[in-house]
Image (cartoon, rainbow, N blue to C red):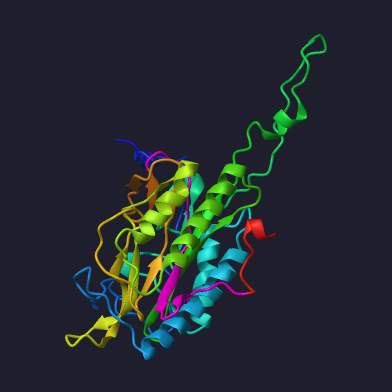
Amino acid sequence: MGGGFGAAARDTFKYSGKVRPGKQSPKRSVPKSISKPDYWKDGQPKARGPMLPWQIQKKSEADIEGMRAAGRIAREVLDLAGAAVAPGVTTEAIDALVHEAAVSRGAYPSPLNYHGFPKSCCTSVNEAGVICHGIPDSSKLRDGAARPTPRRHLSRSSSAAPPPLERLCTASAPPGDIVNIDITCYYGGYHGDCSETFLVGEVDEAGRQLVKVTHDAWQAAIAYCAPGKEYKGIVGAIIEDYIAPHGYSTVREFCGHGAAREASPDGSAGRGAVFHETPNVIHARNNEPGTMQVGHTFTIEPMICEGVEKHILWRDGWTATTKDGKRSAQFEHTLLVTPDGIEALTARTENSTPFWWEK
């Protein structure tokens, strides 16, 4: 017998950080007028790029112009998302903004339904130790500003001195969040891909340093790129050497990638857009083949961790968190190899949110 309500199912997953998944809203719709990638309906990409790691497409002038246009839109959307970062804002609200910003520019938010991903961007909040592919939900971004804690009660007869005000204000105030927002926009048959890590309110010095060092290591790797440079170990070695003095680690399991149109048998561009293709840009020392040539396009997007680089995957099949629950940071550009070096197709503009060290 019995009646009433059964007990709620308990989440027994062994999380590494303190934060748990929030509630997700239904998947957002995209107007019929927007051009869509081939996976938009069933979640399964059909277009295929080169199959072997040393087979890297040289992009035509038309491809490059198309990627520039997609990259500019991705940058605009990322700048809007970054400007919205503030204490109390939910990652769901950021996703809604990203979706509307992309659609209003005639673009499709590339993550939406890619292999079934339920949202229009990735938001990786590092109080949870999320490395990448965090799913926006009802979770609120948290400020790390000092919050006074109640004084313990002292009787009139107590001779104990009250604790210093500094201790009362900071004893229970954990560091503020840092959040990576990863944006990709599909426009005109091409994907533009970029991400940045933002501070939420007052962030502790260790968190600020992690973000700055990650940015600088990323920039050092980009600066090295030029025609004739090997993908093999180049980017990864630079990043590893840059972060080593700080005791950080770099994630190997997630890497940078190419993005373009499907390759036809004759090597020319086909009709479908490929979200991820060769080259594989590993952000640690490696033996990946291939040499940079004019017309190659790819991303560099290192994920740098305070602790170990090993990760666990949440039950949602997407959210990757550090195994020790410590924070990580990430930055990303889509890049083009030019005769003179490198061009960031998702370069920052005067409208981009200044980094904390630029303020």
Q: In the orientation shown, which residue stands out farthest toward the bottom?
A: 62
Q: In the orientation shown, which residue stands out farthest toward the left?
A: 265
Q: Residue at x 41, y 77 (%)?
A: 336
- Asked whether the viewer can see residue 100, the reply is no
Q: Is residue 68 above or below residue 327?
A: below
Question: Residue 334: x and y, percent?
Answer: 43, 72
Q: Nearer the viewer, residue 322 or 336?
A: 336
Q: Is residue 307 above or below residue 92?
A: above
Q: Residue at x 32, y 65 (%)?
A: 231
Q: Is residue 220 left or right of residue 176?
A: left
Q: Is residue 331 above or below residue 140?
A: below
Q: Is residue 228 left or right of residue 47?
A: right
Q: Nearer the viewer, residue 16 or 267?
A: 267
For residue 136: magenta? no
- Bounds of the magenta span? 323-349
Q: Residue at x 41, y 64 (%)?
A: 300
State the image quarter where residue 199 is shown.
bottom right
Q: Is residue 290 left or right of residue 162?
A: left
State the image quarter where residue 148 is shown.
top right
Q: Is residue 223 above or below residue 311?
A: below
Of the 4 image quadrants, the one containing the N terminus is: top left
Question: Residue 65: x and y, percent?
Answer: 43, 87
Question: Residue 324: x and y, percent?
Answer: 40, 38
- Asked whether the viewer can see residue 101, the reply is yes
Question: Residue 30: x and y, percent?
Answer: 43, 79
Q: Residue at x 56, y 67 (%)?
A: 81
